[in-house]
Image (cartoon, rainbow, N blue to C red):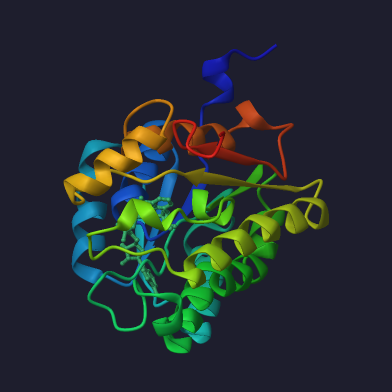
Amino acid sequence: MKSVNELLDLKGRVSLITGGAGHIGQVIAEGLAEQGSNLVLLDVNTEKLNAVAEGLKHKYSVNVMTLVVNLEDEIEIKSVADKVGKEFGKLDIMVNNAAFVGDSSLDGWATSFEKQSIDTWRRAIEVNLTAPFCLIKSCASLFEKSGAASIVNIGSIYGISGPDLSLYEGTAMGNPAAYAASKGGLTQLTRWLSTVLAPNVRVNTVSPGGVFRGQPESFVNRFTEKTPLKRMATEEDIKGTVVYLASDLSKYVTGQNIVVDGGFTVW
Ligand SMILES: NC(=O)c1ccc[n+]([C@@H]2O[C@H](COP(=O)([O-])OP(=O)(O)OC[C@H]3O[C@@H](n4cnc5c(N)ncnc54)[C@H](O)[C@@H]3O)[C@@H](O)[C@H]2O)c1
């Protein structure tokens, strides 16, 4: 029987992380590199992407490839499989982490339901749901060459629960319908793919709770009060769950949604 450490070993594997330059994406990338996986970091933000790639290359003895891709562009998405295939010949792990998360200054996003725009709705669905569908489909032949393929889709508590808008009162923050619908859709796409791509490819979701990023104190206090573990998430909280699902430690786990939210959705 293999030891836990052997099952967690990702040496020789190739992991593609979308949104690899982002807060959670770079921590997931680091977790996979710690276990020896080579990396393909994909993001639309060239400057941040290069900085993250340089850092990880120096810290770990793994190959790091960068792909500047806009996940709102189908042609760019379709170019990914070819580039990864040429460099590595296969793909073992894909983490669909990039997301259209908007911000409070974006028109038609973090606002009342009546003011939420079709334009921001479409962009969120495009990046958060259509792009993973398209990327997974175009990488199918690379997964076949893996022998241990694992896809991890990053969902959200808001793909599971309805919003409690009282959490945001008195702040410029919001909780748009498009984000919730895109993450709920991604969680169901996970279940759909887990049976269709079996037995060669495992597909799971990780749904994080709210990550602390210096949000207004009133919001943090209300969110913390509502969370059984009495704090918001950190990026580190999410890393171990993704590495577990990416590795052979979870080789009999597919179609699941692991909720990493300090108990927020349990009530
Ligand atoms: N931060 C939270 O509280 C939280 C909570 C639950 C779930 N999540 C999920 O975790 C994931 C990571 O979130 P984060 O907080 O690290 O966000 P982030 O904004 O720090 O990172 C997202 C990354 O995705 C990239 N990206 C966005 N649009 C893109 C596009 N069109 N093409 C290519 N790349 C694009 C951005 O450049 C960025 O680097 C997301 O799926 C998010 O929905 C976050």
Q: Residue at (34%, 64%) from the top-left corner?
A: 174
Q: Quadrant of the N terminus?
A: top right
| Above or below for 147 versus 244 | below
Q: Ligand 1 sits in which quadrant?
A: bottom left
Q: Quadrant of the C terminus?
A: top right
Q: Position of residue 23 (x, y in %)?
A: 29, 51
Q: Position of residue 164 (x, y in %)?
A: 45, 53
Q: Residue at (47%, 74%) from the top-left corner?
A: 124
Q: Residue at (31%, 41%) from the top-left corner?
A: 222
| Above or below for 171 versus 58 | below
Q: Position of residue 121 (x, y in %)?
A: 48, 80
Q: How many marks?
A: 0
237 or 200, nearer to the observer:
237
Q: Position of residue 34 (x, y in %)?
A: 37, 32
205 or 150, nearer to the observer:
205
Q: Residue at (55%, 78%) from the top-left corner?
A: 78
| Above or below for 72 versus 183 | below
Residue 259: quarter of image: top right
Would residue 249 be found to the left or right of residue 50 on screen?
Answer: right
Residue 190: quarter of image: bottom right
Would residue 201 be found to the left or right of residue 246 on screen?
Answer: right
Would residue 36 be found to the left or right of residue 132 on screen?
Answer: left
Residue 82: quarter of image: bottom right
45 or 101, nearer to the observer:
101
Q: Is residue 185 visible?
A: yes
Q: Is residue 62 visible?
A: no
